Amino acid sequence: MHERSANQRDFYRVDCHVMISHCAVGDHVPGARQPDSYFPDGEHFNLMRELRRMDHDASHLLHALGEKDRNLGAYLAHLNRKIDALTRHVAALTPEMSRGSEQVVSLSEGGVSFHAPQPPAPGSVLAIRMTLLPAWVGIAVYGMVVAAGAGERNVAVNFEQLQDADRQIIARHVMQVQMAEQRRAREGA
């Protein structure tokens, strides 16, 4: 565990807005159960997540088609924006969104630090569901609580058994947040 905590600092961290929910699942990662199965409103979240994954998987095709035929590329990009609008609407209907669980977290590929009114004990395993904003990309992961206490971000979690697709989503989000921060710094200077 100590070695993993030391490696945690190998990842770039950003402060970013997310919608986050968590559920304690015990002291070890359940083998056969997916983390999103711990949340009762999973169908909305799964639909939103699947739409985003399909969008990501097809993005290179959209780009290639746009290079060959500008009109077709523009039309498909328009359809994509329509689907994005529907995704945001579906996301707004989920109970997680209406509870107002949006907060600023510290996020990296290795873990997340966030605020919990009743922090779980260090060593406990959580099912965590996050929607990365403003992209509305959802991920569900397991995480091990490495620190808990008082304060703004009172729970620190290392991700456990993170799937490659979710790691890539987090890495891309961290990079986008970092680029936006750099852009704001250049414009403000």
Image (cartoon, helix red, strand yellow):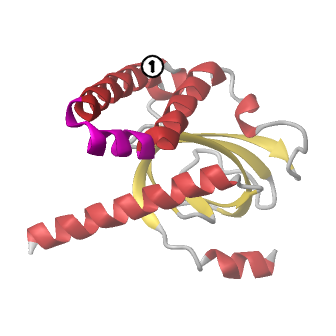
Position in image of residue 130 (x %, y %): 55, 42
Q: Residue pushed farthest front?
A: 68
Along the viewing direction, whichever of 4 and 72 lies nearer the viewer: 72
- Image-quadrant location for residue 188: bottom left
Position in image of residue 133 (x %, y %): 40, 43
The residue at the point 57 percent across, 27 percent down is: 45
Residue holding disc 1: 90
Answer with left or right where residue 148 lies relative to residue 24.
left
Check disc 1 and give the amino acid type. Val
Quadrant of the drawing holding the N terminus: bottom right
Answer with left or right where residue 105 lies relative to residue 5.
left
Q: Is residue 51 placed above or below 137 in the rendered structure?
A: above
| Residue 56 makes an appearance in the image | yes
Main SS category, magenta section: helix
Q: Is residue 147 placed above or below 7 in the rendered structure?
A: above
Q: Is residue 119 placed above or below 78 in the rendered structure?
A: below
Answer with left or right where residue 80 lies relative to residue 142.
left
Q: Is residue 10 placed above or below 174 in the rendered structure?
A: below
Position in image of residue 16 (x %, y %): 40, 55
Along the viewing direction, whichever of 102 and 78 lies nearer the viewer: 78
**In the image, which residues are magenta?**
60-71
Q: Residue 2 colored magenta?
A: no
| Residue 152 makes an appearance in the image | no
Q: Residue 67 colored magenta?
A: yes
Q: Callout 1: 10 Å neighbours few (<14), some, many (20+)?
A: some
The residue at the point 9 percent across, 75 percent down is: 189
The residue at the point 25 percent across, 70 percent down is: 182
Helix, strand, or loop for circle 1? helix
Position in image of residue 73 (x %, y %): 28, 34
The residue at the point 18 percent across, 64 percent down is: 184
